[in-house]
Amino acid sequence: MTADKGTHRRFLTRRRALWIAAIAVVVVVVAGIVLRPPPPPTLWTTVVARGDIVRAVLATGTVEATDLVSVGAQASGQIRSLKVKLGQKVRAGDLIAEIDSTTQRNALRNADAALANIRAQRAAQQASVVQAEAAFKRQQTMMAGEATSRADVDIARANRDVARAQLEALDAQIAQSATSLDTARANLGYTRIVAPIDGSVVAIVASEGQTVNAVQSSPTIVKLASLDVMTVEAEISEADVIHVRPGLPAFFTILGDPDRRFPGKVRDVEPAPESVSVDDARSSTQTSDEAVYYNGLFDVPNRDGVLRIGMTAQVEIELSRARNVLIAPFAALGERAKDGSYTVRVLDAEGRPVARTIRVGIDNRVDVQVLSGLREGERIVVGEAAADPASASVFPPRPPSVPGD
């Protein structure tokens, strides 16, 4: 019995020792895991290389015709015929349309007849003036020989003066009738509507048989545009417009051919937003949180006729450019120092990141021009890849790029 108890006691002792050993192993393993230093972070880097860099203003614009003319009717009446078709090219002076000229022709005949009548009256009055002057001279001669009275002389003088005054009145009426005749002739000419400029018919507003009334306003018949040179109206934000000036190079692309660039130079920047030209209640109640845009204008040739009125243009206006310079990603820059320099991290010969102070030039918020502090071929740290991709500091690096190239 005693032997059995000793055996049982030894069994419990060994079992307790095994448990203690197991717990010790677990403690050692956990301590190793907890106390083990974390692996160094994975660094995203890129190579400092040479290239071109551009600082530019991006804007959305609209393609418009350099010259756009609304050809209207100055005469009232029915449109008898239209001589042009949509898209047709015309020269200045070409006939566009004809308006029924019956009323205008009758007015011209009446004015011509009125002028002829007044001229005939003048001819008759001219004879009366000659007769009155002759009678006055006879009275003067007779007065010298005391063969007539002073009253008869005064009557002859008055008759002469009245005849002269009536002749002057008829001269004034002739001038007035001549003006009326010229007006009637011009009104007749207005029934033939001709092209004021060389261009293409971009819109036909009226149709044959339509009656137009030019009394209150000049109704538009067609619209002509010169499409050999187009004007781009780029909407430049108020934050960028202070940097844009005439003469800066610019280009734009269109939605239908995004790979083709249409180059030009800024011709002008309008001094006020477009809302100023809108004379209504909205322009006077514009709130401060609304975006303000100013039109930048530049012209581009349209020899092949690809550009059309109203097209959307993606515009880039070049503010500055540097060629064949060292370029680094903007994301690699640290905080800006008071002296304008930046701190970056560069990999040394053993692949360890070391701090470096650099100075930059052109900054387009994607890449920067490196003026000093880096050499071509050095690897610069852009960011760190954390164990959790969602907590990564920046996006993966990319090769230096040049906006607009």
Image (cartoon, grey):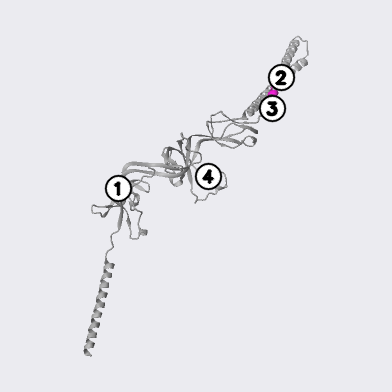
- The amino acid sitting under disc 3 is Asn
Q: Residues within 10 Å of mark 3 (few under 14, many from 20)?
A: few
Q: Is residue 393 above or below residue 1?
A: above
SS for dot 1: loop
- Looking at the picture, tell me which residue is in the foreground, 333 or 69: 69
Q: Which of the marked residues, 3 or 4, is nearer the chain's N terminus?
A: 3
Depth check, mark 1 against mark 4: the one in front is 1
- Quadrant showing the C terminus: top left
Q: What mark, if any, has residue 275 been given in the picture?
A: 4
User: Picture quarter containing residue 86?
Assistant: top right
What residue is drawn where x is 74% and y is 11%? Answer: 138
Report if the CB atoms under discs 2 and 3 are less than 8 Å apart. Answer: no
Q: Residues within 10 Å of mark 4 (few under 14, many from 20)?
A: some
Q: Which of the marked residues, 3 or 1, is nearer the chain's N terminus?
A: 1
SS for dot 2: helix
* 93 with respect to 32 (left or right): right
Q: Residues within 10 Å of mark 2 (few under 14, many from 20)?
A: few
Residue wearing tag 1: 48
Say how many tags the image has.
4
Q: Which of the marked residues, 1 or 2, is nearer the chain's N terminus?
A: 1
Depth check, mark 3 against mark 4: the one in front is 3
Distance between the Cα atoms at labels 4 and 2? Answer: 61 Å
- The amino acid sitting under disc 2 is Ala
Residue wearing tag 3: 106
**In the rendering, at what x and y percent does residue 3 appear?**
21, 88
Query: For the magenta stretch, what is the residue range?
Result: 112-120
- The amino acid sitting under disc 1 is Val
SS for dot 4: helix
- The amino acid sitting under disc 4 is Ser
Residue wearing tag 2: 120
Distance between the Cα atoms at labels 1 and 2? Answer: 98 Å
**In the rendering, at what x and y percent does residue 214 appear?**
64, 35
